């Protein structure tokens, strides 16, 4: 069990946690009386008796004060493709209680203490899993046209702000890189999990006609420049989904098995393709 340092001026709830598993991980969060954690819908796994669930607008942070603030906070979530609502899990009894959240697909859960990163962390919009109540889950607009048009995630990424603990998910194997000032790392746009606010993020053209047309890696990649910390995933969900779709049997057709030499030509010979 890991414990956060004691910050007397902390706004977010102070939580304990344990991460279980290797490839399909889940995080168990231990809550003291009246402590709470917020999570995206669909990430909940299990909870002890005495944990109360409450559906809230936005993220429940102090930034969402009043009706207008809550509506604005919830409305921002529409831009990231998320629900208007989040779920808060409260310990409503005396004594410690636990609630657990699971990874959506094979990968690693990354614990982020926002106090170590100046109170802000930027991540892909589908990377956020859960956080201590009091953490603000907002949007990060790109001020650069190239990043917005070709960055894969558009003009918008998620920003996690506050002084609490947050948990993000990386698909496949996670790589952590600490960039020195001026050091550059080029990454496939979908492989970025998140980075600290000091990292400069932009989109760069691959270059070269052969690379662009025949390279198979897309026309653009992300250029990350330090100083700061970067988290990279080896298996973005979009890549996993594309492979599953490509390998799925065709409707009404015959599955020849992966790696067939004939492929589409075999379908023509068998008469599966009709003109």
Image (tube, rainbow, N blue to C red):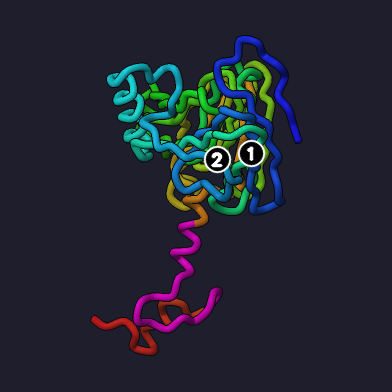
Residue 33: tell me if it is visible.
Answer: yes
Circle 1 is placed at which residue position? Answer: 97
Residues packed near mark 2 inside 10 Å, few (<14), some (14 to 19) or many (20 plus): many
Q: CA distance from mark 1 to mark 2?
A: 7 Å
Circle 2 is placed at which residue position? Answer: 51
State the extent of the magenta-drawn residues as a range.
241-259
Q: Quadrant of the C terminus?
A: bottom left
Of residue 257 and residue 64, the one placed in the foreground of this image is 64
Q: Is residue 266 left or right of residue 130?
A: left
Of residue 131 and residue 97, the one placed in the foreground of this image is 97
Task: Report the residue that reaches farthest toward the top.
Answer: 9
Residue 257: x and y in percent read 53, 79
> Does 252 appear in magenta?
yes
Q: What is the number of callouts on the image?
A: 2
Residues packed near mark 1 inside 10 Å, few (<14), some (14 to 19) or many (20 plus): many
The structure residue drawn at horizontal position 54% and vertical position 19%, both measured from the top left corner, is 162
Residue 5 quadrant: top right
């Amino acid at each position: 069990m890991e414990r956060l340092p004691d910050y007397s001026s902390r706004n977010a709830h102070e939580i304990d946690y344990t991460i279980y598993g290797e490839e399909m991980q889940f995080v168990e969060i231990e809550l003291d009386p009246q402590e709470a954690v917020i999570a995206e819908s669909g990430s909940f796994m299990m909870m002890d008796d005495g944990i109360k669930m409450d559906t809230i607008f936005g993220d429940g942070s102090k930034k969402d004060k009043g009706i207008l603030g809550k509506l604005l906070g919830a409305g921002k979530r529409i831009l990231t493709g998320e629900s208007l609502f989040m779920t808060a899990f409260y310990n409503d009894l005396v004594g410690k209680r636990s609630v657990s959240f699971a990874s959506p697909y094979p990968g690693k859960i990354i614990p982020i203490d926002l106090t170590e990163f100046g109170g802000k962390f930027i991540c892909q919009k589908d990377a956020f899993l859960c956080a201590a109540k009091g953490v603000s889950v907002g949007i990060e607009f790109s001020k650069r046209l190239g990043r917005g048009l070709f960055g894969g995630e558009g003009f918008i990424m998620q920003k996690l702000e506050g002084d609490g603990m947050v948990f993000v998910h990386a698909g496949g194997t996670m790589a952590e890189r600490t960039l020195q000032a001026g050091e550059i790392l080029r990454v496939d746009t979908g492989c970025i999990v998140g980075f600290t606010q000091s990292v400069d993020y932009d989109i760069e053209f691959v270059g070269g006609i052969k690379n662009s047309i025949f390279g198979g890696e897309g026309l653009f990649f992300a250029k990350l420049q330090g100083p700061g910390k970067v988290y990279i995933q080896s298996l973005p969900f979009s890549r996993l989904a594309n492979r599953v779709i490509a390998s799925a049997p065709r409707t009404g057709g015959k599955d020849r098995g992966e790696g067939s030499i004939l492929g589409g030509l075999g379908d023509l010979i068998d008469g599966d393709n009709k003109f």
